Amino acid sequence: MKVLNFGSLNIDYTYRLDHIVKPGETTSSKKLEIFPGGKGLNQSIALAKAGLDVYHAGMIGKDGAFLREICQSNGVHTSYIKEVDEATGNAVIQVSDDGQNSIILFAGANRKLTEDYIDKVLEQFEHGDILLLQNEVNMLDYLIDQGKKRGMKIVLNPSPYDRNIERCDLRKVDLFFVNEVEAGQITGKSRAEEMLWIMREMYPESGIVLTLGDKGAYYSDRTITYYQEAFKVDAIDTTAAGDTFTGYFLASYINDQSGKKALMKAAVASSMAVERKGAAVSIPCKEEVEIRLQTIE
């Protein structure tokens, strides 16, 4: 079984501030740092650091060659990453002193996928392989449909939630990763238990991972529901917390660990990521997570 992550690759411009800028406010940043990022890249690196064999597909511009190198250096297969005549996607990220963040995305090359490119990549995968997706690339509905036709298991993080998600047949998704904002947008509810219950009603054949930040996370499928508390740490930067959680949960789940064990490992890994600056560079390796787990179990 192989894992294909068809996802974004971004250059993150991260500004350090006292607080997130308010509407109409102008302020000076304390520092500008440039990091590799994008939900796709972050999740691929998290999967690789968690010990999984992962292939990444997506588009970059000439300015994004270093993103391919970052993926390679972290153990991600990059032969399906394609360079196009368009600026690499990027993000403007504000990070406040208390570790909160605000993000503006520019899609750039991430939105240049074509049917021909998608088909050629998917031809290299088969029934039972996993297709991991987020909503920072175009043609998401086509990716879901074609992946499902090939018998691949569809894993979706519908972020950011917009009309592109509404065009997709989400009944074809085998496993969802949603935070409380996305779950609220899908269900129209605000309480975690209600959101989980409604999603279970809407997609009875799907597994659902619902993350709630410092309030913990749930995993639910047609037979069981688990809850995992968040681990309390001093947060420096929460930018890659969700992507780290996704990568470590999926890697553990694929390796036949229960949803309960996968939740705990993912919670530990994401708590370690927020203790560090940056997105992809903040994701801990498998050995670090195992050492931290030994202090908890």
Image (cartoon, rainbow, N blue to C red):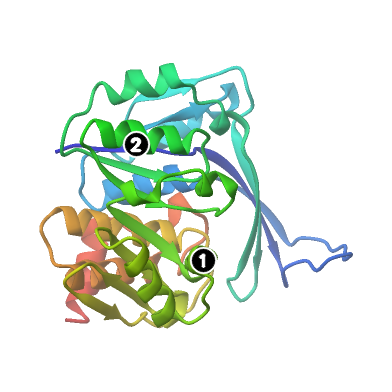
Q: CA distance from mark 2 to mark 1?
A: 23 Å
Label 2 sits on a secondary structure element that is helix
Q: Which residue carries the number 2 mark? A: 73
The type of residue carrying mark 1 is Thr
Q: Which residue carries the number 1 mark? A: 238
For the question of whether residue 157 can be seen, the reply is yes
Q: Quadrant of the N terminus?
A: top left
Q: Nearer the viewer, residue 65 or 57?
A: 57
Q: Nearer the viewer, residue 256 or 27?
A: 256
Q: Quadrant of residue 199?
A: bottom left
- Identify the residue at image location x=25%, y=65%: 289
Q: Quadrant of residue 251?
A: bottom left
Q: Quadrant of the C terminus?
A: bottom left
Tally of numbered discs: 2
- Identify the residue at image location x=43%, y=82%: 215
Single out the residue that lies furthest toward the front.
201
